[in-house]
Image: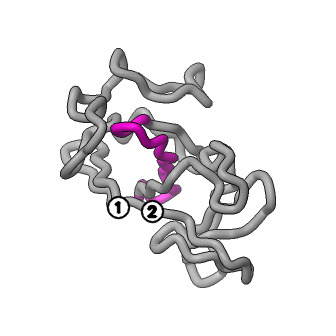
Amino acid sequence: MLGSADRGRAVTEGDTVSAEATQTAVQGPVEICTLDDLERDWGEVALVGQRQIAVFRMQDDTVYACDHADPNSGALVMARGIVGETVDGVPTLASPLYKEVYDLRDGSCRTGADFTLPVHKVSVEDGRVLVELGA
């Protein structure tokens, strides 16, 4: 289970990741944790197949997921980015390295840089967070 003592640690097989998450080619939604495992406005990392995925719980309990790799440098840092939203309510994530700001809904860069952050479909069912990897 993830908690404040587990910040920055990837979810592993001993946590809440199902056996499906350890396969190289992951198809369909994979349960990665419970909603209660995620702190609001804070990122956590889950290993899904061979990909590190950053997962964020917003103040309204909406959950977003994206690749943990920074689109600019490739460094595995996005879970440490700054979570926020625009004046019109668009959920955003600022890269902790180069400060590009990405829309968590579609991965587009809102600060003009020519980068896109891969985002993934998330659903919450009965308190369980499920992620389906995008391309």
- Quarter of the C terminus within the rendering: bottom left
> Is residue 47 rendered to the left or right of residue 49?
right
> Is residue 84 rendered to the left or right of residue 125?
right
Q: Residue 26, percent across and down?
A: 25, 44
Q: Residue 20, percent across and down?
A: 21, 34
Residue type at the position of mark 1: Gly
Question: Would you place residue 116 above or below residue 12 in this image?
Answer: below
Q: Which mark is residue 134?
A: 1
- Looking at the image, which residue is at 63% across and 50% down? 78
> Is residue 93 rendered to the left or right of residue 31?
right
Question: Would you place residue 123 above or below residue 17 in this image?
Answer: below
Q: Is residue 53 magenta?
A: yes
Q: Which mark is residue 119?
A: 2
Question: Would you place residue 9 above or below residue 78 in this image?
Answer: above
Q: Crowding at label 2, few (<14), some or many (≥20) Cα neighbours within 10 Å?
A: many
Q: Quadrant of residue 121?
A: bottom left
- Looking at the image, which residue is at 73% across and 83% down? 112
- Quarter of the N terminus within the rendering: top left
Query: For the magenta stretch, what is the residue range?
Result: 47-62
Seen as rendered, the residue at the extreme right is 98
Q: Looking at the image, tell me whether mark 2 or mark 1 is earlier in sequence order.
A: 2
Q: CA distance from mark 2 to mark 1?
A: 7 Å
In this rendering, the label closer to the viewer, 2 or 1: 1
Q: Residue 50, percent across and down?
A: 40, 38
Residue type at the position of mark 2: Val
The secondary element bearing badge 1 is classed as loop
- Residue 128 appears in the rendering: no
- Looking at the image, which residue is at 60% across and 67% down? 92
Q: Quadrant of residue 108?
A: bottom right
Q: Are marks 2 and 1 in contact (CB under 8 Å)?
A: yes
Q: Which mark is residue 12?
A: none
